[in-house]
Amino acid sequence: MRLTAAAYQVPTDAPEGDGTLAWDSTTMVLVRAEADGQVGVGWTYGPTAVVPVVTDLLAPVVAELEPDDVPAVWSAMQRQLRNAGRPGVAGLALSAADCAVWDLKARRHGLPLARLLGTARRQVPVYGSGGFTTYDAQAQHRRLSEWVHDEGIPRVKIKIGESSGSEVSRDLARMAAARRTIGDAELYVDANGAYRRKQAVRVMRSAADLDVRWYEEPVSSDDLPGLGLVRDRVLPDVAAGEYGYDLAYFHRMAPYVDCLQIDVTRCGGISEFLRAAAVAAAAGLEVSAHCAPHQHLPVAAAVPNLRHVEWFHDHVRIEATLFDGAVGATGGLAPVNLDAPGIGLDLRTVQAEPYRVA
């Protein structure tokens, strides 16, 4: 089996930011797993440094392995990363490569990846995400209105925690404006860890009349006791987990949140996503798939305790641009590929080439 990788950097359609970070482009690293004339693809969103991790560290240790033996392939790759460090760039590489190997296996057997994994559902609930702090009032209204009123998505999220939590009055004003725009749809907010513990509680109490249902990373995801404190003092469900790179992370976090987020492009790929979802289920929790919506659809369909997939504006736009086979989410449900082999997506090589940076 042969692993290769390439990176594509796509400018955002407008400046994007949250409570603690801003950006004007997004880099997708695509891994190809090839064997017997078939090619599987998997990807992650991260720096171009992911590419040499795939080609220099992971590719040599899987070259002689049987592509169908995904557990053996995954184990060989994660062992190889011991001294490189599993979290961070190396974890992104492992995740994209594992997804590519699963896609390759499905294509070699002529099966949709969702059929290979088995399905608990054939349509996956999504929530609209991307109400960035960089948006002005008109841009926020337009984005939320498109999701709720044009596409029928019944749950949407905006970013709060403006300027590392120093602009709470603007956060509250944007939340109130969002409620006016979306009517009875569910309102989610994401502070990206910008608040302090009691500040996070005060913010949500000030927003009590807005019926917020989802409070993502009200404090740093590294502050597990803080997440638990906020969870026990506010009405919205507290969620975190998007920065989880290994199974132990999710085991540690589960007692402190209402919903565990998992990112298949960070956590170790499809192989580890399934394990992390089982850890959540053992704790009585649902899971929510973080970003990279099309990479998540097959595994999200396989997980009984899934709540939803994040239909993240930036990644939806990139995946629709770079791949044939991308789908929409009208009515708040994204269809799972049950016909084409593998994940059902193929890179638009000609269209993608101008964005290639590595």
Image (tube, rainbow, N blue to C red):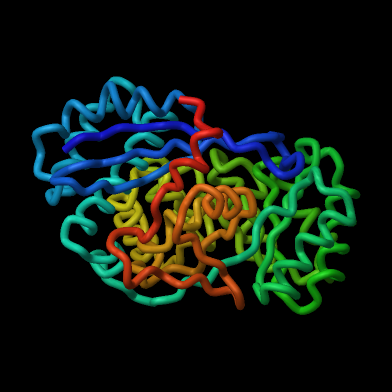
Give the side of residue 213 with respect to residue 259, left or right: right
**Quadrant (top left, top right, bottom left, bottom right) of the N terminus:** top left
Nearest the camera: 77 or 191? 77
Counting from the top left corner in percent of width and height, residue 306 is at 44, 68
- The picture quadrant where one finds residue 163 is top right
Nearest the camera: 115 or 74? 115
The answer to whether residue 65 is above or below residue 123 is above
Give the side of residue 214 with respect to residue 285, left or right: right
Counting from the top left corner in percent of width and height, residue 85 is at 35, 25
Counting from the top left corner in percent of width and height, residue 251 is at 37, 50
Nearest the camera: 228 or 113? 113
**Quadrant (top left, top right, bottom left, bottom right) of the C terminus:** top left
The answer to whether residue 272 is above or below residue 355 is below
Counting from the top left corner in percent of width and height, residue 178 is at 82, 64
Q: Residue, x 36% and y 41% (percent of image)?
A: 96
Q: How many numbered tags mark residues here?
A: 0
- The picture quadrant where one finds residue 129 is bottom right
Q: Residue, x 39% and y 60% (percent of image)?
A: 280
Q: Residue, x 87% and y 70% (percent of image)?
A: 180
